Amino acid sequence: MAFQLNSVVPWGRNFAEYRLMFELSDEDMKKKIAGFGDGSASFNYEATEQGYKVTSFDPIYQFSADELRGRIDEVRAVVMRQMSENMGNYIWKNIKNLDELENIRMSAMRLFLSDYEKGKLEQRYICHELPKRLPYESGSFDIGLSSHFLLMYTMLGYDFHINAMTEMLRVCKEIRVFPIVDLDANKTELISDVIKHFKSSYDVEIRQTKYEFQKGDNKLLIIRN
């Protein structure tokens, strides 16, 4: 089945959030980074502006900037209403309230859109859907990142997550997945099973981060070749 625009819910995070979520040090930022499922985040744009090397992969990059801008406008009110209805599930510390959250997200997505067409020409935004094989040789990237996708969407099933992360580990020397809870911020059997699978062949670390917005989503999974 073809990936449909009406299934996209853009909700971009920014450079500062990525650094906190993934514990990205100054030395890490000097490495070649791949972002999987980056969507409408401004991480790629902001990193590029500072001279870093980031390549983002997402199936939504098949759409034009105008199509994505239209979709952002369509879902903005819906997402904010859902956030309002579930405020008790979040920690309002670094982000103080709903207005600030909306401003941060919309600012990130505007930066992404301003860079999108240029970034596609420079092959920084590449249309790709895991777990399909990436058009890169093994070890092409130093660090691979997955923000709010892998391990969260448990309904995709065990095989999907294993295959997706295996392909990430083929092209990346190390991958980092944040957070390691499901959509309701609960640790699940799927997550435990996935970690158990990779522990047999890779170095696996679970690290607590300084970033916690949804309650309980303050742990980072790191897997190294």
Image (cartoon, rainbow, N blue to C red):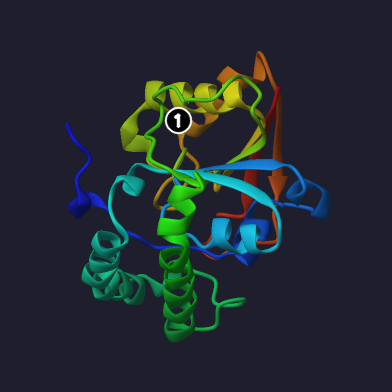
Label 1 belongs to which residue? 190
Q: Residue furthest right?
A: 27
Q: Position of residue 164 (x, y in %)?
A: 46, 27
In the rendered image, residue 4, in percent from the top left (x then y), is placed at 19, 45
Left or right of residue 177: residue 76:
left
Disc 1 crowd, CA 10 A, few/some/many (<14, 14-19, 20+): some
In this rendered view, identify the residue nearer to me: 162 or 63. 63
Above or below — where is 151 with respect to 96? Answer: above
Residue 181: tell me if it is visible.
Answer: no
> In terms of depth relative to the viewer, which is nearer, 70 or 117?
117
Residue drawn at 48 percent across, 60 percent down: 41
- Front-most of 158 and 47? 47
Residue at position x 33%, y 33% in the image: 156
In the foreground, 67 or 186: 67
* Residue 81 % position (x, y): 28, 75
Q: Position of residue 148 (x, y in %)?
A: 47, 50
Determine which quarter of the picture holds residue 35: top right
Q: Looking at the picture, which amino acid does disc 1 mark? A: Leu
Q: Is residue 86 left or right of residue 179?
A: left
Left or right of 39 on screen, residue 96: right
